[in-house]
Image (tube, rainbow, N blue to C red):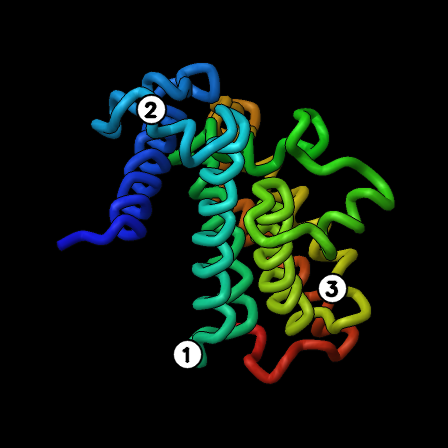
Amino acid sequence: MVTRAESAALTRRALLDAAAGLLDLGGPEAVTLREVGARAGVSRGAPYRHFTGKDSLLTAVVTESWERIADQVHALRTDPARSASDKLRGALRTLIGVGRDQPHLYQMLFRRPGHRPEELGEGLDHVRRQLCAPAGDPAADRVRAAGRFQDEFLAIVADLVGERNARHYGALLLAGAHGVADMELTGHLETDALRTTAEELVDTLVRMVTDVGERHGDVGRAGSG
């Protein structure tokens, strides 16, 4: 017999899956609690027993996505068979792959917090809620999940350029990956003027950062590949 807690977990899972599917199909505007409930096959009131509204539901979808991405990057980082540069290449391709396959979700991953009531504010309030918010705070959970990805990613970058330079080159790489994902999505990379691919640009980014590490003698034990 299914317990009440197990039933609630199954319902929450169905709601999250339904919301993610609707987001992929039509963006945030396509996600309504009524449509999510219908798609999940639950009662009309069920979504409101698990989420305070559409924003908290979408925030939970984004949080789960950051967790999945962080898991993938962690697997890359801890793979002893991969070189440091191959780990970085894989991490960048993972991020760009989300932009390619789930563009609406990708845009939400990088939406600046603070634009909706339940999301984090800026400055000291941002730090306070990130560190002190209680478990189950959707906005704080989202920040923690995104921070986990960032930590995993920066650890990979540090293996190539050293701890001191990791944040600088990490930011450069993420900005580059974000631009590549956007230009691929809008079709700009395949124009006659550019004639390149996301994979070629990722290889160039990795090679540039690897060269920086080699010049400074900072390439980690995993090697430059």
Disc number lying in front (3 or 2): 2
Residue type marked 2:
Val
According to the picture, the residue beneath numbered tag 3 turns out to be 166
Q: Position of residue 207 (x, y in %)?
A: 61, 60
Q: Nearer the viewer, mark 2 or mark 1?
A: 2
Q: Position of residue 35 (x, y in %)?
A: 32, 18
Disc 2 marks which residue? 36
Sequence-first disc among 2 and 1: 2
Mark 1, Cα crowd under 10 Å, few <14 / some 14-19 / many 20+, is few
Query: In the displayed image of the protein, which residue is found farthest to the bottom?
Result: 221
Q: Quadrant of residue 178?
A: top right
Q: Which residue is mark 1?
A: 81
Mark 3–mark 1 Cα distance, whole angstroms, equals 22 Å
Picture coordinates of residue 204, whole percent (x, y): 59, 52
Q: Amino acid at mark 1?
A: Ala
Depicted 115 relative to depicted 4: above or below: above
